[in-house]
Image (cartoon, rainbow, N blue to C red):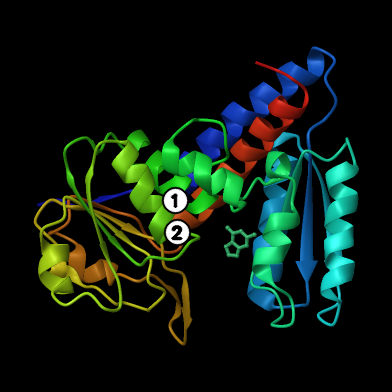
Amino acid sequence: METKIIDGKQIAKEIRIELKKETKRLMAEGYPQPKLSVILVGNDPASETYVRNKIKACEKVGVESEQILMDASVSEEALLSEIQRLNEDPSVNGILVQLPLPKHISVDRVIETIDPKKDVDGFHIQNVGSLTVGDGKGYVPCTPGGVIELLKRSDIPIDGKQCVVVGRSNLVGKPAAILLLRENGTVTVCHSHTKNLKEICQSADILVVAIGKAHFLSGEEIKEGAAVIDVGINRTEAGLVGDVDTESCMGIAGAITPVPGGVGPMTIAMLMKNTLAAYRVQNHIQ
Ligand code: GUN
């Protein structure tokens, strides 16, 4: 079987082009420029790279951006009051606090302080609630949203398919499972306590792997023809690798996302999509 490589970079570019058109059109109608504020605490090199790429994406779609850098020793109180300031600034449509945060800061408190209407990460409990009940009001978290978009734009049907999600994090695994369920997939979530993980993975038509362990799965755990979506980005001596050993899946999987160049670029494209959605809400645009 020939394995199709799903080109996340190209699909993300297509999304950015669509969003840029929308931004241009709305600004031509007299609306202000959309704006995203990104807060980065400390100087973790990986986070710095992610933030840089988010700022670059803003430029590409015509969104104004600002980067707010805070020292790793910043107090939780100072961070929360900066978020409050951004909540109250009508020129700011989206607020993103790059994770992880230093240990002395409560991630939950930070997320709950962000105005849900500006929570373009989709992490606020109100947005998580909207996602779960499917009322269409909230923002979908960017990485799982990107997973669904990749499947749809690659013409991979979800309806009625056996979907297996490996990993149950609040950022990826859980929301990915909910989104697949919303698309009428039959969803199983595997995690560190799952007993027969290998067999469950072998049953998947769609396998989403978000466990954060380099080459955790290989071709042996893949059903012939399955779509494999690798969310992992692991820094190893051999460079960036996914949670799946892509090479060993070639000729077995029907389609697979590469690392890098698969889900990663989609996360940022979906952030741009959420930023424009937030801008529409705040400017009362249908
Ligand atoms: N760190 C890793 N992924 C993400 C993400 O999607 N959003 C934020 N805010 N931080 C992250």
Q: Nearer the viewer, residue 156 or 127?
A: 127
Q: Residue at x 44, y 66 (%)?
A: 169
- The picture quadrant where one finds residue 61 is top right
Query: At which x and y percent is residue 40?
Result: 77, 66
Circle 1 Cα neighbour tier, 10 Å, few/some/many (<14 / 14–19 / ≥20): many
Query: At which x and y percent is residue 70?
Result: 86, 71
Label 1, ligand 1: CB separation under 8 Å: no
- Residue 99 lies left or right of residue 219; in this view the side is right
For ligand 1, give the image quadrant: bottom right
Q: Are marks 2 and 1 in contact (CB under 8 Å)?
A: yes
Q: Residue at x 70, y 18 (%)?
A: 285
Can residue 122 be seen here?
Answer: no
Query: What residue does disc 2 label?
Result: 172
Q: Nearer the viewer, residue 79 or 220?
A: 79
Q: CA distance from mark 2 to mark 1?
A: 6 Å
Q: Residue at x 70, y 38 (%)?
A: 117
- Identify which amino acid the numbered label 1 is placed on: Pro
- Identify which amino acid the numbered label 2 is placed on: Val
Residue sitting at the far top: 29
Query: What residue does disc 1 label?
Result: 144
Q: Residue at x 37, y 47 (%)?
A: 178
Q: Is residue 213 above or below residue 204?
A: below
Circle 2 Cα neighbour tier, 10 Å, few/some/many (<14 / 14–19 / ≥20): many
Can residue 132 be seen here?
Answer: yes
Query: At which x and y percent is residue 276?
Result: 67, 32
